[in-house]
Image (cartoon, grey):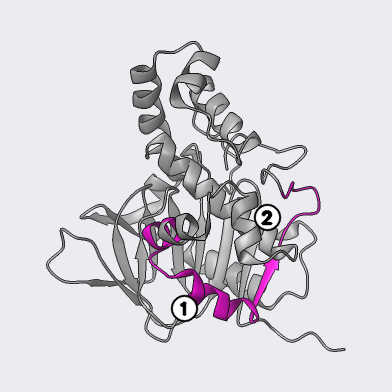
Amino acid sequence: MEHQPSRSVLYLWPRRTLHVGRPGRAIQFSQAAASLTVSLDAPFRVRTPTMVSPVPCTSLLLRPGEKATVDPGTARVGTCYLDALGQDYRLLLPQMRAHESGLYRGFVREAELRDLCELMLNAAKDDGSGFEALEHVINPEAEPYPDVDPRVAAVVAMIRDSVAENRSVKDLAEAVNLSVPRLVQLFRQQVGVPIRRYRQWHRLFVTAINVARGRSLTDAAIQAGFTDSAHFSHTFRATLGLRPSEVLSELVRTRLVVPADLSADTGVASSPAQAGA
């Protein structure tokens, strides 16, 4: 049977995730990961709480935890949620042409990213080449990624490896020989958001993996560590600016792509290529 293009697609790679589609509504960004967004059609409009009025743009880089409203109108957009440790974000900063009110606009390889998103939306399957192509767009010269604090990287790995557990900050700090205040400070500096916020973000990622593998949304959320459906719904709305029911209604038209070696329990690949999400 001939392949029919999806209305939207979500690629759940361990280091980055990529969503491409036509939202049809304004999106409230307040996620725990930096993101790079590009329009596949007409410019979208973006506004932060400190801006008097929205501004048009065709590509946008948001830092972790940045609050912004993106109104795509009828345009299709591609959004790449970047690595947890901020390596992608720091590498991309000098590649943006304009900066105002916490927004970085005008990605220098915007056309390449747009073409890639179009390709990924219409692809019949992903053989791993999609992630390699995205890596080339973000880091075409294969430059060394910015250094990360190994203690913070270890804490991120512990959170990912035990996503369904609520390991205390004290436990995490002791595991890397830091005081709680020092770990809290370092984590915020490196990742851009508090430990609890990152844990919730990763649980949403694991929930999506579980849904992609056939579980109901409620079962998927509980397996990812949410205490109940109300906890999941609150986190979902606070993080993504949408109700879970709005996403559920789109799942039948959204293609979810998960690497074969990605664990449904933790969202961790068996052999991740780089530190990060």
Total labels: the figure holds: 2
Q: Is residue 184 above or below residue 257?
A: above
Give the residues in magenta: 235-264
Category of crowding for the residue at label 2, using alpha-carbon neighbours closer than 10 angstroms: few (below 14), some (14–19), many (at least 20): some
Mark 2–mark 1 Cα distance, whole angstroms, equals 22 Å
Asked if residue 72 shows in the view, the reply is: yes
Instruction: Give 115 or 271, whichever is nearer the viewer.
Output: 271
Instruction: Give 170 or 82, whichever is nearer the viewer.
Output: 170
Residue in view at x 41 percent, y 50 percent = 95
- The disc labelled 2 sits on which kind of residue? Phe
Q: Which mark is residue 214?
A: none
Q: In the image, residue 144 lies at what x, y percent?
A: 57, 33
Q: Which mark is residue 131?
A: 2
Q: Secondary structure at mark 1?
A: loop
Q: In the image, residue 190 lies at what x, y percent?
A: 41, 31
Q: Is residue 188 magenta?
A: no
Instruction: Give 183 or 211, whichever is nearer the viewer.
Output: 211
Q: In the image, residue 137 lies at what x, y percent?
A: 57, 55
Locate residue 193: give its quadrant.
Answer: top left
The quadrant of the rendering that contains the C terminus is: top right
Q: Of circles 2 and 1, which is in front?
A: 1
- The disc labelled 1 sits on which kind of residue? Pro
Residue in view at x 49 percent, y 38 percent = 87
Tell me: 212 left or right of 203.
right
- Residue underneath mark 1: 23
> Looking at this rendering, what residue extends furthest in the right direction?
1
Category of crowding for the residue at label 1, using alpha-carbon neighbours closer than 10 angstroms: few (below 14), some (14–19), many (at least 20): some
The first of marks 2 and 1 along the sequence is: 1
Q: Is residue 256 magenta?
A: yes
Asked if residue 136 shows in the view, the reply is: no
Tell me: 228 left or right of 242.
right
